[in-house]
Image (cartoon, coloured by chain):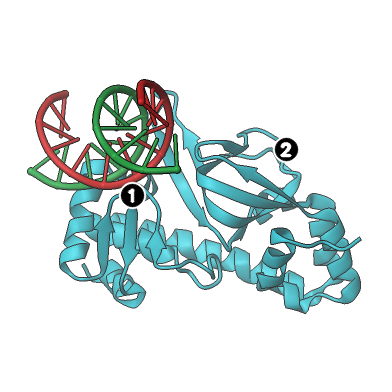
Chain colours: A cyan, B red, C green
Amino acid sequence: MTVSGPLKTFLESSPWWSGLTVAQVERVERDAFLRSYQAGATVCQRGSPAVHWLGVAEGLLKVDTVASDGSATTFAAVPSGSWFGEGAVLKGELRPYAVVAIRDSSVVFVPRATFQWLIDESRPFSRWVIDQLNARLGHYVAMIESFRLHDPAARVAYCLSEFFNPQLSPRTKSQLAISQEELGRLSGMSRQNTNRALHELEQAELLRVRYGVIEVLDVEKLRQFAWKP
DNA sequence: ACATTAAATTCGA
DNA sequence: TCGAATTTAATGT
């Protein structure tokens, strides 16, 4: 049986797809499945076994944790076009963080066994996974640097620029449907300071703020701003 | 924290 | 099904 529709479309647009053999394509098409979530819904609970590797076909997810006082901090935003959760699946551990839909989303699930089989069978695929893990490591190191050394506007600029990381989020379009509150959680700042930072970036013509939407005008300038505020 | 504004939803014809 | 009224969400200070 052949897979069709949005699942197949998404798989075919994924950067690692073209490196697979016909047999590998067939197995992934057989094993992968797609689920839809409403905004606010939990995709993976914290503490649940990591038995799938995940791709975002549509929408926007976040990886976050809730402190005992109820406040939430976001470790990662995962826009459509991104694959994530390699680390948790490889280790076979319980998910250390929750995955939540920020807005209506559809998510592709690849079973753990299929993912590990691809790593064993496909050199291009395992190479791509190495690049993926390496890009994520680079991202977190850069984020620590940004947060320790730079002011709020530069931090927000960095977080926004990472929505366009070519390895981790290759298909992000310039209109980001994310609230300032969510962006604040991602940037480790209050909503108020996030608001100020956004207007500073708007003054610099790097982006435009709209209701519930941030329109990025120039990703390259955003990256530069993140490093020399 | 509070006031304002945009968007989403409900309701009545 | 249209649009006014109400509620909810997001923003600005």
**Mark 1 element type:** loop
Q: Mark 1 lies on which chain?
A: A
Q: What residue is rendered at 44% in x and 61% in y?
A: A141
Up/down of A211 relative to A160, above or below: above
- Which quarter of the rendered picture does the N terminus of chain A lie within? bottom right
Q: Please tell me how crowded label 2 is: few (under 14), some (14-19), or many (20+) other residues with Cα within 10 Å.
A: some
Q: Which chain carries label 2?
A: A
**Mark 2 element type:** loop
Q: In this view, does A201 lie to the left or right of B4?
A: right
Q: Is residue A4 left or right of residue A26?
A: left
Camera-side residue of A110 and A147: A110
Q: Where is residue B7 in the image (x, y as percent from the top left)?
A: 34, 45
Q: Name the residue under label 1.
A: A212
Q: Is residue A117 left or right of residue A201?
A: right
Q: Name the residue under label 2.
A: A49
* Amino acid on which disc 1 is placed: Gly
Q: What residue is rendered at 20% in x and 71% in y?
A: A205
- Which quarter of the rendered picture does the C terminus of chain A lie within? bottom left
* Amino acid on which disc 2 is placed: Pro
Camera-side residue of B13 and A51: B13
Q: What residue is rendered at 55% in x and 59% in y?
A: A80
Q: Which one is earlier in the sequence, the residue at label 1 or at label 2?
A: 2
Q: Position of residue A2 (x, y in %)?
A: 87, 63
